[in-house]
Image (spheres, rainbow, N blue to C red):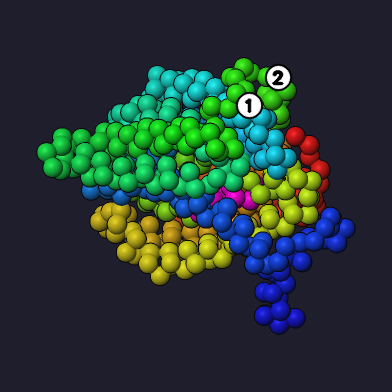
Amino acid sequence: MNMTGLLAKLFSVQSMVPLSMRQGDLPSEGQAYGKAFRIAWPSALESSFVALISAADTMMVGSLGPAAISAVGISSQPRMIMLCFIISLNMGVTAVISRRKGANDSLGANKCLKQSILYSAFISFCACSLAFLFAEPLLRLAGAGPEFLAMAIVYLRIICFGTFFYGLCLTINAAQRGIGNTRLALRTNLTANIINVIFNYLLIGGNFGFPRLGVQGAALATALGNIVAFLMAVASLVPQKNFIHLRYACGWRLEKDLFNSLFKVSSSGLAEQLFIRFGMLLYTRVVSSLGVIEYASHVIVMSIYSVTYNLSDGFGIGAAALVGQSLGAMRRDLAMMYGRVSQRLAFLLSFLASLLIYWARHPIVHVFTEDEQVLVLTSRLLLILVVITVIQTVQVIFSSSLRGAGDTAYVAKQALVGLGIMRPLSSYFLAYVLGLGVVGAWLGILADQGVRSLLVYKRFAGGRWTEIDL
């Protein structure tokens, strides 16, 4: 088979679903790819904007030196620990509401919405309060060095306030994604991004008469953007014409059956998030112990990596919604098809992104810093990122598809193997035993993504996940 024939088969809808799974006619390539793209592109842009919020802080504090870059970067780990409980809840929210949407059960969808908001508010308050109180030990655990620990504590405590509202915003966005409304999250995060960048400029350097607050200014800008995003998300639930809205006459009473449905997905999702956070905590300690210059280089590349990862994750979010809706409509074949269609789309965009990173890696680095040592090291790490960007589409999209079907237990297991165990161990071996430093740590990420991609592809291709009932 020539290259043209191979590509045609790879992207053909008919080749994506085994004949034994067919339950009816499949849509044409134009219909399938068009629907997947319409659902996914707002999530892809939204997810990228979320990463850009963090990247903007890193860029704009770059003028304050490597220590400030490290302070902002190290704070991301405690912040993600705060959010891991919300993220796991939201996996259940999207999965359950997408099933209710597929079955045209508006009552069930709105009950899930209201109960999820209550759970999210409670979880966000507890997590943010604990992170504020124990900011210093959390940052020390993450590997914060004495050169930037004080700045990191101030930054983390300020963003704790905004993270409470951000957690609620994420839950509302997850509910909207379940019914296919991925554009809301795009609007909220685009607005948050713009506000963050504007107030970064005003508060970090003290422009237009505003006080020069440095790292504190970056934290305040992020918190303000999060609050505005939350208000926009709440406003989306006011119109009664929408499939889900706050005025639906179903009350706010908690129900055991609905809790059990959410818990079935979210409990495994929480295990996955805890494995991820455990692995990332160990991995961050490995890298942060290499020194300020190497860690600052790592933070810059990680900011860029987050954008490319979230680009794929956006298509994963679309895949989860389409998979859940297809299963709710009792079409297992369409669920598998949309998972694969979403992966092909993510692959194409990630390939283009990797080419952009390769050809523009030197100008990209200069946006973050002018420190010569950091510039040289960061440019090398971006070459590894080029490969990771393409490989990760398999792991990201198929994992999201499995989550959308409720198969979160398997996703948690592969997260434990890859990110919880393999990434920190391989990174330590390559960085310290072989003496490759931060380059070895990034080769550890490449190894992790490769192994997890193989594991999750095998699970997805098996098709047993299409039989899970929620």
Residue stretch rendered in magenta on the structure: 310-320
Above or below, 432 against 343 in this view is: above
Q: Earlier in the sequence, mark 1 or mark 2?
A: 1
For residue 457, say whether it is visible. Answer: yes
Residue bearing the label numbered 1: 111
Answer with left or right where residue 389 lies relative to residue 30. Answer: left
The label shown at residue 256 is: 2
Q: Residue at x 68, y 58 (%)?
A: 340
* Place of residue 276 in the rendered image (x, y in percent of width and height, measured from the top left): 57, 38
* Relative side of 379 to 269, left or right: left
Q: Residue at x 68, y 54 (%)?
A: 339
Residue type for callout 2 = Lys
- Does the image show residue 310? no
Q: Secondary structure at mark 2?
A: helix
Percent across and percent down for residue 285 are 46, 38
Is residue 129 positioned above or below 165 on the image? above
- How many numbered circles are shown? 2
Q: Residue at x 79, y 50 (%)?
A: 332
Decide: is 178 above or below 297. above
Amino acid, disc 1: Lys
Task: Find out whether residue 312 is within the magenta segment.
Answer: yes
- x%, y% of residue 211? 15, 35
Q: Quadrant of residue 3?
A: bottom right
Q: Is residue 267 left or right of residue 309?
A: right
Nearest the eye: 409 or 338: 338
